[in-house]
Each structure stands twice: as structure tokens, then as C-alpha cells.
Image (cartoon, grey):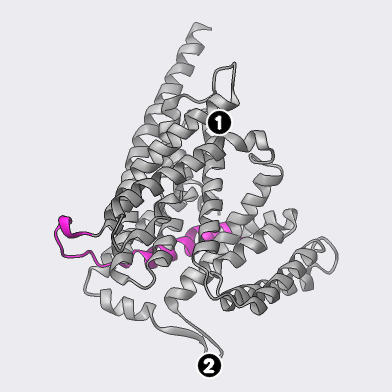
Amino acid sequence: MSLLRSARFPAIILLIAAGLGLFVANSAWGSAVDDAMHAHLGIPGVFELSLSHWIKDGLLAVFFFVVAVELQYELTVGQLNSARKALQPAIAAAGGVVVPIAIYAAMAWGSDATAGWPIPTATDIAFALGVLAVFGRGLPSALRVFLLALAILDDIVGIVFIAVLFTSGVDFTALAGAAIAVVAFGILSRQLDTRARVPIAVVLVLLAIATWVLVYLSGVHATIAGVVLGLAMAQRPALRVRHALEPWVNVIVLPVFAFSAALVPIPSVPLSELSPAFWGVLVALPVGKVVGISLFGWISLRIGHRGSAPPLAFADLLAAGALGGIGFTVSLLLSELAFSDAAALRDQATLGVLAGSVISLLLAGGLVSWRAWHYRRRTAAASVTT
């Protein structure tokens, strides 16, 4: 199980799954797999969803639960548990959201692709930390902490966009029912250390399922159920559940979603005829993130360290910005949501996410390797002089 929990493994599996999805979509099996993704599963006449919806609304809710548990921990006892700690990565994260949006909006202005502006705002924490683990031996802990906080804040932005921008026609009765279920879930989770933990755990699972169904029926995107349950659960049992779920999220949930999201036929049109949905995401992810995170991060370090040298050099921030450009999971979901009624634009935006994330991945690998080599050389030089 240690391999499934490692930082390197999820990044490799995600990349393979996305590549396989792209290959299958453009092979002779493409149409058959697409038909399978649209097949409906569930209780006929009661609750049915297509396989694609079960994956992006159901499986991905488990991923968001794990993210929310980590977020709860960081906000209470971790790297974001005070305004002072959160200020610097928050400013950098703001730059990593604002600049990509500005680049995308400028490129898509006046076209039918303008609705895709939230897509390049996300950072895939699994990919970013995976690249850092593979190439970052010798990096200072300050850079790892900064990147982790940055990625978590980016996740918060993505969650807010999903909850606010892609919700319409809310059924407040169903939403109220979901709220009651979440409150009951949170209260009961605080009784898991008693002798009745087994029946309580069964009830918690049933409440979680009920919450997910009610959130879906309310019109709010169903992945938000995973977020609120992760934030509501008592921290100690939540961390245990996260530990138990992490391997399954890494080896099943995220790869299956990456495969299904990457089932996109490559358009047989000249590059000049590709939509701004493709070009905007392709440029905004690697360029927007590097510029936004490094520039705003540099400003944040000056604000937080007046009168003393900042712990990160500007070159470190460039590496963090490149890592932030690996959008992938949440960006793929935002592509699905932003262009849910425009299949051609959705496919091109998805290709933009994949291409932009790969460019960021390669750039990040180079920059992280360079910075790690720099710090290893400096450490070696210091040990020789002493």
C-alpha cells in the first residue's frame, strides 16, 4: 500500500490513464467506448445516471471528500491555520487564478468559448507533488510547504467555482434535506470512538449516500457533497478515513476519471481553425500560472518578510508556478461543466487542458530539477567549507 500512497505513483498512473483515454477515443474502439459511457445505470424509474455521470459526479465526490479532509486539517493545525501562514500562498494563489483568467478571457473575447474562463485556474495537487517528489530531491522544505498551501488554496477556488458557477434551478427542499444529513453526519462522526462505532459507521455511510443523492437532486453539483462531508466530519476519524481511501482514490477514482475525461477525438482541422477554448487553456495554464504565481508570490514574500531575506528565491517561485500549471483533474472537470452543452468546445478545451498540463509538467520537471541541483550543490559547498 505504501506505493499507492506515494507522491510519485498517482502522477504516473494519471498520465497513463489520460494517454490511454486519448488513444482509445481516436482508435477503432472509440465509438463503442463512447456508447458505454452514455449507458444508464441505477434503479430504473427511480435514480439513473449515465456511466459518465456516475464517474464525474459520484466517484469524483470521493476525491473531493479526501481533499476536504486535508483542507480541514491544514486550516486547523496545518500550514494554513493562521492568517500569517496563509497570507503568502494566498496572494500567490490569487495571482495563479487572476492571470490565467485574464489570458484566457483576452484570447476568447467575443467568441463562443468565453464560458471556459474558469478552466485554467486549477492546480492538480497529486500531479504537482508527484513531480516535486520525482525531481525535487534536495529542495528546501519551505518550497514544499509553499506549494502544498498554494495547491490547497487553488482547490478551494475550484470548489467555489463548481458550487457557484455551475449551479442552476436549485431545489431548496432537497438542499435543506442534504444540510440536515450533513449535520447528523458531523454529530455522529464525533461518536466513532465509542463502543457503538460499528453501527455508527454504517449509519455514517448511509448518511453520506443520502447527502450525495440530495445534493445531486438539488441541482448543486454532486461533488460538493464530498466537500461538505469532509469538512463536517470530526478530524481524527476523518484523517483515518482519508488514510484508508487514499490508495483507492489514487489507483481507481482519479485514473478512471482521467481516462473518461480524456476520451476526446482529436479534431481533424488545421491549427488555425481550433477554437479559443483550446488555445486559451493551452496558453493560460503554463504561461498564466508561471507569471501569476511567481509575480504575486514575489510580492507576497516582500509583504511577509519586511526587513529580512525571503526564504524562497524568485527562481523557486518560477518552479512553483510551473507546477501550478499542471491543471489536470479539476481543470478537466471544469471543462466538462463549462461546455456541458457544447461538445465540440468541451473536447477542444479538454485537449487544451491535457496539452497545457503536459507543457507545464515538462517545464516544472526542468525547473524543479535545476533548483534541486542548485540547493544540493550549495549544501555540498557548505559542508566542504566547514
Q: What residue sits 17% from the left and 59% below the top? A: 273
Tell me, yes or no, if residue 322 can be seen here: no
Given residues 245 and 44, the one toward you in this image is: 44
Q: What residue sits 50% from the left and 46% below the top? A: 7
SS of the residue at dot 1?
A: helix
Q: Which residue lies furthest to the bottom in this view?
A: 45
Q: Badge 2 local density, few (<14 within 10 Å), some, or many (20+)?
A: few
SS of the residue at dot 2?
A: loop
Whether residue 297 appears in magenta in the rendering, the answer is no
180 horizontally vs 134: left or right: right
Q: Pick the quarter of the image with the N terminus.
A: bottom right
Q: Mark 1 points at which residue?
A: 141
Q: Badge 1 local density, few (<14 within 10 Å), some, or many (20+)?
A: few
Looking at the rendered image, the disc whose residue lies closer to the viewer, 2 or 1, is 2
- Amino acid type, mark 2: Gly
Residue 295, image x, y percentages: 43, 32
Residue 361, image x, y percentages: 36, 44
Q: What residue sits 51% from the left and 51% below the top? A: 3
Task: Tell me: residue 103, above or below residue 311.
Answer: below
Task: Tell me: residue 225, above or below residue 97.
Answer: below
Residue 210, image x, y percentages: 66, 77
Q: Residue furthest right?
A: 195
- Amino acid type, mark 1: Ser
Secondary structure mostly seen in the magenta stretch: helix
58 horizontally vs 227: left or right: left
For the record, the magenta segment spans 245-274
Tell me, yes or no, if residue 273 can be seen here: yes
Earlier sequence position, callout 2 versus callout 1: 2
Q: What residue sits 50% from the left and 37% below the top? A: 92
The tally of labels here is 2
| Label of residue 45 in the image | 2
